[in-house]
Image (spheres, rainbow, N blue to C red):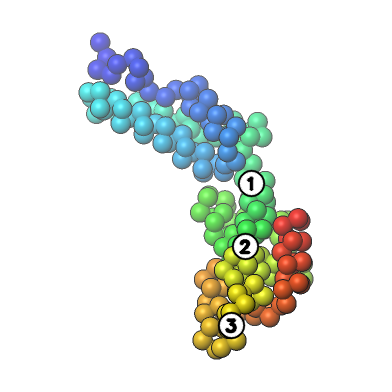
């Protein structure tokens, strides 16, 4: 008799595939992200099996076999079109920019999610424009203004806030710097009047 009860049978290719499909039905994911989801499913089984008194060597061997199915499932999801790192990167680039993230912060976020450098570069150019194009600079300024509105900086400052003192101006610039915006973009954002700033934010969010 197996030392591991039937209800703790290890994940199979079929069960892991179902896990992948359920996850992708609810969430957009990268290949790395989905692989991590499936890895966690295997780890949960292993912990449960150990808690039910399974032998560690047997659990480890079965977990290793389950993990061996993950790469094939990822490839299968890619063939089905359910996984597309390039499309994910383009979509996430736009949504993060609209939320007030700088191009640099967007790139860092996507790299953390496992988007490769080549795919990332192409996605950023398709979604946000070439970094040296005027359109890309204008989108970066609009993203900075979204952040300014959230933090009540520049044109969005409170009526009683005096942002013209050198100290407070430097603090405002530091907020933009920490978010990955360049000095030129930060200075432009702080200098705009409220009406133009609002127009640029609305144009970004509707793009």
> Residue 57: x percent and y percent?
25, 28
Task: Say if 154 sits above or below 126 in the image.
Answer: below
Nearer to us: label 3 or label 1: 3
Helix, strand or loop status at disc 3: loop
Helix, strand or loop status at disc 2: loop
Q: Name the residue under label 2.
A: 100
Nearer to us: label 3 or label 2: 3
Please state if 74 lies on the left or on the right of 129 as rendered. Answer: left
Q: In which quarter of the image is the N terminus?
A: top left
Task: Say if 174 sits above or below 93 in the image.
Answer: below
Residue at the image position 77 percent from the left and 66 percent from the top: 199
Q: Mark 3 points at which residue?
A: 163
Nearer to us: label 2 or label 1: 2
**In the image shown, does 56 or 88 lie closer to the viewer?**
88
Indicate which disc, 3 or 2, sits on the residue closer to the N terminus: 2
**In the image shown, does 163 or 21 lie closer to the viewer?**
163
Residue at the image position 76 percent from the left and 72 percent from the top: 196
Can residue 155 be seen from the camera position used here?
Answer: yes
């Amino acid at each position: 008799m197996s030392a591991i009860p039937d209800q703790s049978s290890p994940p199979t290719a079929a069960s892991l595939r179902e896990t992948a499909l359920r996850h992708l039905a609810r969430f957009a994911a990268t290949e790395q992200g989905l692989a991590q989801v499936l890895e966690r499913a295997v780890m949960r089984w292993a912990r449960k099996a150990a808690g039910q008194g399974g032998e560690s060597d047997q659990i480890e061997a079965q977990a290793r076999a389950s993990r061996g199915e993950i790469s094939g499932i990822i490839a299968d999801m890619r063939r089905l079109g359910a996984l597309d790192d390039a499309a994910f990167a383009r979509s996430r680039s736009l949504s993060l920019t609209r939320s007030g993230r700088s191009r640099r912060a967007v790139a860092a976020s996507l790299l953390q999610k496992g988007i490769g450098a080549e795919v990332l570069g192409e996605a950023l150019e398709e979604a946000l424009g070439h970094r040296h194009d005027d359109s890309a600079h204008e989108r970066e300024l609009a993203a900075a203004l979204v952040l300014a509105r959230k933090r009540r900086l520049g044109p969005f400052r409170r009526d009683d806030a005096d942002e013209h003192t050198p100290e407070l101006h430097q603090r405002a610039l530091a907020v933009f710097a920490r978010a990955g915006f360049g000095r030129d973009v930060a200075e432009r954002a702080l200098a705009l009047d409220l009406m133009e700033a609002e127009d640029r934010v609305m144009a970004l969010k509707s793009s």
